[in-house]
Amino acid sequence: MIMIPRERPVLENLNSHYVDLSRLAEHCQGEFGSGCIHLKSPKTEGVIFFDNDAILNSVFQSKDEQLEGQNALDRLIEAMNEHNFTIHVYEIEQRKIYFWANIPAAREIYKDLRTEFADLEGLIREMNSERLTGFIDVSISDGKETGLIFFDSGQIVGGSYSWEKGELNNSKDSQELLISKVKRSGGIFRVSKISFPKGEDRRESEEDTMKPSRSIITMLEELMGIFERVVRSNKKMKQNFSTLLKKKFVEKAEKYPFLDPFAAEFSYSDRRITFVGNTSDERLAKGVMESVKELASELRILSQLRGELVFWLQKHQGELGRWGISF
């Protein structure tokens, strides 16, 4: 089964004639961390799921073949010489990539349910009661718009929507908009169940109980201290540093819930970070650094900040390189 995010890709319309697939995968691992590469030609289609460290799964599909895993990856590399593919790259949050990578093995349990006979809200409630781990695939108005709702043991854990920009999200507003569109225009639903290989679904739950190390907290304190100094030195700033930072953390809270100021897990004050939540060193570093980088860009001080971070980047190049974090 070929299933890709419904949102806009982060890289799109690459021509396979000019692309080395192995190098593209390495670049995407370093640039985006986790996601998928989708390849499509008139006769053949494939997808490669990856995280920072490895290729997690691959699928190759043609009229005569349906392959998964290493065999699919080998066949895709071979097919690059036989077909002209259009390539899109999608970023998928690290916490959800293992969910996506197991979608190809999903088993369809309900097919082509139509709104004349099935209500989407009722179907969601039914999947909740059945403790589904899988997804509902929704096609609206003959496929003009589409949506996916993901479940983990009956709980909605995210979605992917053709009208959204970005990656898998948990937005209640997006789910309600999907339901509204279905009520207005009608739709077709497919429900699939995912059975994770034994042990593979532990990576996310383990991360949920991890505590970041003191060394990473110190590293991020140094970063925040430099960033704060650069912001405060700019006399054109009308809002204070703390307000700007909290506003950015609110924006990033859907992707990095531990940054949500209302959750009070992460706080920065007097050049010190206090963190009482659970996450990995990598996730904490990525969340803070993405926030700092975005805010610096919005404030038009990114170039100045990079200049101030030269020695900090050199000092921590080992950790940043291992996690594929760039500034």
Image (cartoon, rainbow, N blue to C red):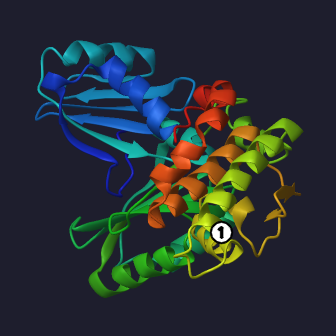
Q: Residues within 10 Å of mark 1 (few under 14, many from 20)?
A: some
Identified at 57% across, 52% down, the residue is 290
Q: Residue 219 versus residue 237: which sits nearer the camera? A: 237
Quadrant including the N terminus: top left
Residue 185 in sight in this render: yes
Residue 268, position as x, y percentages in the image: 79, 63
- On screen, residue 158 versus residue 260, left or right, reads left
**Quadrant of the image occupied by residue 42:** top left
Identified at 51% across, 76% down, the residue is 236
Identified at 37% across, 85% down, the residue is 183
Q: Residue 184 versus residue 130: which sits nearer the camera? A: 184
Which amino acid, by three-letter code, is at mark 1? Leu
Q: Please determine whether, in this image, residue 83 is positioned above or below residue 146.
A: above
Q: Please determine whether, in this image, residue 129 is positioned above or below residue 193.
A: below
Q: How many marks?
A: 1
Residue 99, position as x, y percentages in the image: 57, 43
Identified at 47% across, 74% down, the residue is 174
- On screen, residue 75 versus residue 219, left or right, reads left
- On screen, residue 267 versus residue 51, left or right, reads right
Residue 131 in sight in this render: no
Q: Residue 279 versus residue 326: which sits nearer the camera? A: 326
Residue 213, position as x, y percentages in the image: 85, 38
Q: Please determine whether, in this image, residue 83 is positioned above or below residue 103.
A: above
Element type at marker 1?
helix
**Quadrant of the image occupied by residue 315:** top right
Q: Which residue is mark 1?
A: 245
